[in-house]
Amino acid sequence: MEQLEKVENNPHVLLHEVGKSFTERLVLTEIDLQINRGEFVAVVGKSGCGKSTFLRLLAGLETTSEGSIYMNGETLTRLNNYARIMFQDGRLLPWKRVIDNVRIALPNNAEEKTIETLNQVGLGDRLKDWPRKLSGGQRQRVALARALVHDPELLLLDEPLGALDALTRIEMQDLIESLWDAKGFTAVLVTHDVEEAVAIADRVLLIENGKISLDQKIDLPRPRHRTQQEFSIYVEEIVARIMGRKPYTKQIKKQQIQTVSI
């Protein structure tokens, strides 16, 4: 009855008692999660904790071992046609030009929309280039355009910026955030970079021991600035939780209170 009530509430994405095992290895278990339409959710955790498996389940690239996933109130039993996924490597076809990489699986009359999408990611002047002529950041822009040209309701991002240099990474974060704001899709980002998660997500989920052990709302106005004290506090407290230590920011607060009381 509780499960039916949750589905009737119709969140955009709902996971109910989801588990995933590979042979005898348990990767995820007892995942209960609701993602509302238009939310930006980031998923963090140590390597091997199940972040990418979680994303592949949402994409329908893996099936659950237990429990159910719902999208728009419908049980997800196969490839999620509402979603598109972007990986860490652009996975561009080297024998196809930029425009042809983006319009894969689109009808022949989709050229106008493809060009429009490439303009949105800042590559309107590179559509006839070969992938080998692009920088790492530009290749990821092509991969982003290839996902967005289908107008997905759910954009899944599997550490897409992990191989980029620091400045290019921030540029891409800003681009993804601006397109999310303009288009209104729901986004789930898997990342090992806690600063990145706090910079662009509404909520940060921490996966530990196969479960969601933290669901932290990021209550900061946009655009967010990494130099803000509140930003640093969120980052430090999430990192401390991952590492299993006390947050340094809380130690500072405690010392300040003690100083005042003296």
Image (tube, helix red, strand yellow):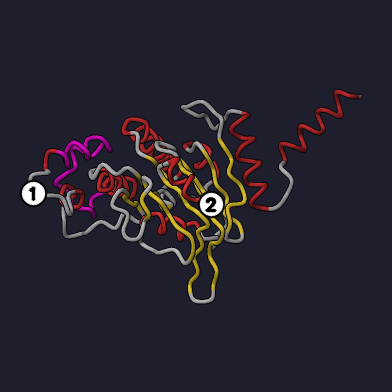
* Segment tinted magenta in the rendering: 113-134
Q: Residue 218 sits in which quadrant?
A: top right
* Residue 194 showing in the rendered view: yes
**Residue 215 placed where, x, y %?**
58, 44
Q: From the viewer's perspective, is residue 258 above or below residue 30?
A: above
Side of 80 where 232 appears, left or right: right
**Residue 49 placed where, x, y %?**
55, 60
CA–CA distance in space, label 2 to label 1? 41 Å
Q: Residue 148 sits in which quadrant?
A: top left
Amino acid type of the residue tagged 1 in the rendering: Asn
Quadrant placement of the C terminus: top right
Task: Give the crowd class for mark 1: few <14, some 14-19, many >=20 residues within 10 Å.
Answer: few
The local secondary structure at tag 2 comes to strand
Q: Residue at x 48, y 45 (%)?
A: 6
The extreme front residue here reads: 1
Q: Residue 63 sits in which quadrant?
A: bottom left
Amino acid type of the residue tagged 2 in the rendering: Asp
User: Label 1, on which residue?
Assistant: 108
